[in-house]
Amino acid sequence: MKKITLLFSLMVIIIANSYSQYNTYYVGHSGFGFSQFNLVGAMVEGLAIDAGINTYDYGDQIIGGSCLSQQWENHLTTSTGDSWVDIPGGNGSGQYDILITTELIPITEALDPNASAWGCNLTPYTALDNYHDLAVTANPNTTIYMMEFHNECDFTIGTPTAAYNNWANLNTTNRLLWEQVADSVMNLNPGGAPICIIPVAAATQALADSIFAGSFPGISNFIDIFEPTDGLTWKIHNTDITAYLTACVHFSSIFQQSPIGLTNELLGLTVVAGTAPTNAQALIMQQIAWNTVSNDPRNCFLITEVEENVKSKNDWNTYPNPTTGDFNTPDFSSQSDATIQIFDVFGKLVKEMNQIESNSTYHLKLSEGIYNITITTNSEILFSTKLVIIK
């Protein structure tokens, strides 16, 4: 464990200092900003300036309600944002160091085989791979992210608690789909850099949890984290106040450092006008952002020896998956004293089972969610997979 911890610390230091420029290009929909006053790129710039970082700049291509396929098909002609055709990084000069994309919400619609019916002619894998190739051709050292945005919340299905539970379940189960898109593009580009995830959905869910717990000052109703003009069946957009959380999540991911203590007033938004979070609200959102990002195993600076070992081992396609708890072990009959370790999405060990057998069925009593499962023997990882638990 000490060896792993030490390697983790060293990897964080090495990766965090691997580049000094943070020129970032955002491609996506209104999850990157619902108005000119809460654009994520501009808010991150304000946080960076307050943190004394002067090597950040940004461009964006924002088309409201779009899938990544539509972004790609319009990337040479769109008048929204900067459009990649206007950016030197698009013709090989490598102006950008970071590419941040997102996908249609819910991502299941972009993955639907009939997605062309609503204008998504390319699969998320193809569209992301196109952007990947464009970015690394311009700058081979480009870091690529997908922003996992939260799902729409339907407040007409019952109580706020019922609405929250339905929404939280969508966020949890769809997380695996975001990972699958990222993994597929990485498989298309073996040996390339990882495609990392910016976990806005998890952070927004943590914010909702704090509201339900009565620990978030000034907001007592879950519905108030969403833009009031959204319909009751599709609450999704941030308010100017809660957009601050999204900006803090991006700041934490891009710079790999905590936003705690940074300014709460950005882009002319003020506490007096009710458009900026109070100091107390900002502190909680800063803490949520850093805790969420720093513990997310798919963020670029969370690379450990364990993860590298897993990548080199056999993938294990267990079934059924998703499952209510049952899963089947692969064949490892040549090994002895095997152990299953189960980790949640934050890397916390939640269950360990010793002396398991190959080609056997086991039942897990776990809450709904996504889990990473490894089978080890003599401290060597034999197999690894992700398992989705549903109820």
Image (cartoon, grey):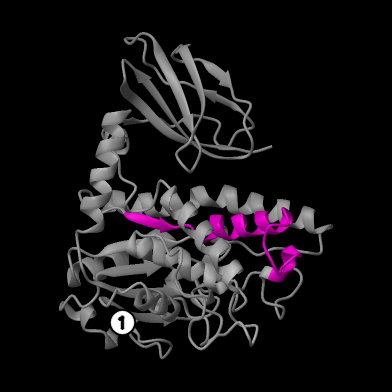
Tell me: residue 332, above or below residue 44. above
Q: Quadrant of residue 58?
A: bottom left
Q: Hey, what amino acid is under mark 1? A: Trp
| Left or right, 61 with reference to 215 | left
> Badge 1 is on which residue?
84
| Left or right, 284 with reference to 235 | left
Pick the residue in front: 6 or 194: 6
Q: Kindly identify the residue that appears in the image at 83 percent across and 57 percent down.
A: 159
Residue 82 screen position, x and y as percent: 35, 87
Residue 114 screen position, x and y as percent: 55, 62
Q: Is residue 207 covered in magenta?
A: yes
Judged from this view, the residue extending furthest toward the right is 158
Q: Quadrant of residue 236?
A: bottom right
Residue range in magenta is 195-224
Q: How many marks?
A: 1
Quadrant in the picture for the N terminus: top left
Residue 72 screen position, x and y as percent: 38, 75
Tell me: residue 178, above or below residue 389. below
Label 1: few (<14), some (14–19) or many (≥20) C-alpha neighbours in 10 Å: many
Q: Kindly identify the residue that appears in the image at 56 percent across and 80 percent down.
A: 34
| Left or right, 229 with reference to 83 | right
Residue 363 screen position, x and y as percent: 60, 22
Tell me: residue 113, above or below residue 265. above
Quadrant in the picture for the C terminus: top right
Q: Secondary structure at mark 1?
A: helix
Pick the residue in front: 86 or 52: 52
Residue 112 showing in the rendered view: no
